[in-house]
Amino acid sequence: MPQPEPPLWEQLAEKNAALPQGERLQKVLAVRGWGSRRVCEDLISARRVTVNGNVAVLGRRVDTDHDVVEVDGHLVPVKEGLVHYLVDVPSHDTPRIQEVHTMVVHVLCQIVEEAMP
């Protein structure tokens, strides 16, 4: 007598286990500031994104601990725990670039000093 076929959810679980795990590439790019998920999908469709040197396709998943992601040859930092800071300069106060640089360095130094034990 033949063995009964396993339930559908078990079959799907086996298939999913064989698929690459990780986050969707367009989500990773969007979180890292490359645009909305839709814009990031367009970047991928335009063949401007590579993962580990290979042109990425929609639906690609990436392991943020091991994969190297690039957009137009520019490395995308995908490691968790990266922090981004936004410096707001009022529009009525248009400083020169050197003043902005000095301000950013000063703010970052304060943040690092506060974080150090």
Image (cartoon, grey):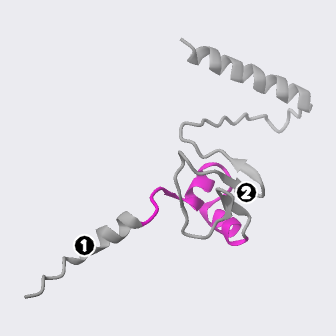
Q: Where is residue 21 in the image (x, y as percent from the top left)?
A: 45, 58
Q: Compared with residue 74, is residue 111 higher up or lower down, i.e. above or below?
A: above
Residue at the spot of label 1: 9
Residue at 12 percent across and 82 percent down: it is 3
Q: Looking at this view, name the residue that lies furthest to the front.
A: 1
Residue farthest to the bottom, as pictured: 1
What residue sits 12% from the left and 87% below the top?
Answer: 2
Q: In this view, does 20 lie to the left or right of 31?
A: left
In the rendered image, residue 20 lying in the magenta stretch gets the answer yes
Mark number displayed over residue 45: none
Residue 105 drawn above or below residue 68: above
Residue numbers of the magenta segment: 19-46
Say which residue appears at 92% left-offset and 31% top-offset.
96
Q: Please, what is the three-letter code of the amino acid marked with disc 1?
A: Trp
Q: Mark 2 points at which residue?
A: 71
The foreground one among 40 and 46 is: 46
Residues 93 and 84: in front is 84
For the residues marked 1 and 2, what is the alpha-carbon distance in whole angstroms? 37 Å
Q: Is residue 114 above or below residue 24?
A: above
Specify the quadrant of the image occupied by residue 107.
top right
